[in-house]
Amino acid sequence: MTTCTADGASATVVAAEDGERTRFFADAITVKHRSEALDVWQAVTLAGCEPPLHVHERQDEWLQVLEGRVLATVGEARLEAGPGDLVFMPRGVPHAYAVRGEHAILHMVTSPGGFVEVFDELNRLFGGGGMPLVLAPGHRGTVEPALARHGVRLVAGRTTV
């Protein structure tokens, strides 16, 4: 990371290899930036390991496909997205995505910030090696309260798009 300060303002470049590495189940997450204003992370998501249908009560979310393809569900809309495409998922609207192919590399942004703290909390709650690779029904008692503390709820009865 490179930071320059001039006239009281800071400019920062986060290099491609920089960031805090963590996981959200099988997804490899690299948190690039966290602040009150916004969170930025990159996710390598494997087909079949996508987050379940959920709603953010506090944050708007943007998903940009860097590699691969996804089918995003945002409310009632189904949106096919490929490299360079950007999908907006507003707060209060149920959303999820399904990876087409083996995996997708996604650039994610939530605003305001604070959401990426859920990755830290879930890895702490599961202890040892962090979150298991697959979200199983028995994990809901740990996952749902942690998500709720961060303003996210899973949509009952639906786990995928």
Image (tube, rainbow, N blue to C red):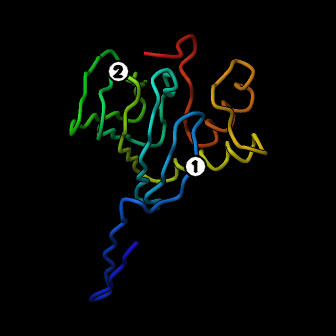
Q: Amino acid at mark 2?
A: Arg
The location of residue 14, given as percent across then percent down, is 37, 65
Whole-angstrom CA distance, mark 2 to mark 1, is: 23 Å
Instruction: Give the quarter of the image for residue 103.
Output: top left
How busy is the neighbourhood of tag 2: few (under 14 within 10 Å), some, or many (20 plus)? some
Camera-side residue: 116 or 19?
19
Residue 55 vertical position relative to residue 18 in the rendered view, above or below? above
Camera-side residue: 31 or 10?
31
Residue ID at (41%, 60%): 17
Q: Is residue 145 left or right of residue 89?
A: right
**Which residue carries the number 1 mark?**
22
The location of residue 18, given as percent across then percent down, is 44, 63
The location of residue 97, given as percent across then percent down, is 39, 24
Give SS at disc 2.
strand
Quadrant containing the C terminus in the rendered view: top left
Q: Residue furthest front?
A: 102
Q: Residue furthest bottom?
A: 7
How busy is the neighbourhood of tag 1: few (under 14 within 10 Å), some, or many (20 plus)? some
Badge number at residue 89: none
Residue 40 vertical position relative to residue 13 in the rendered view, above or below? above
Residue ID at (40%, 35%): 91
The location of residue 50, given as percent across then percent down, is 48, 26
Sequence-wise, the earlier of marks 2 and 1 is 1
Q: Residue furthest top?
A: 157
Residue 114 vertical position relative to residue 106 in the rendered view, above or below? below
Q: Amino acid at mark 1?
A: Thr
Give SS at disc 1.
strand
Camera-side residue: 49 or 8?
49
Badge number at residue 100: 2
Instruction: Give the quarter of the image for residue 107.
Output: top left
Residue ID at (43%, 53%): 39
Q: Residue furthest left?
A: 84
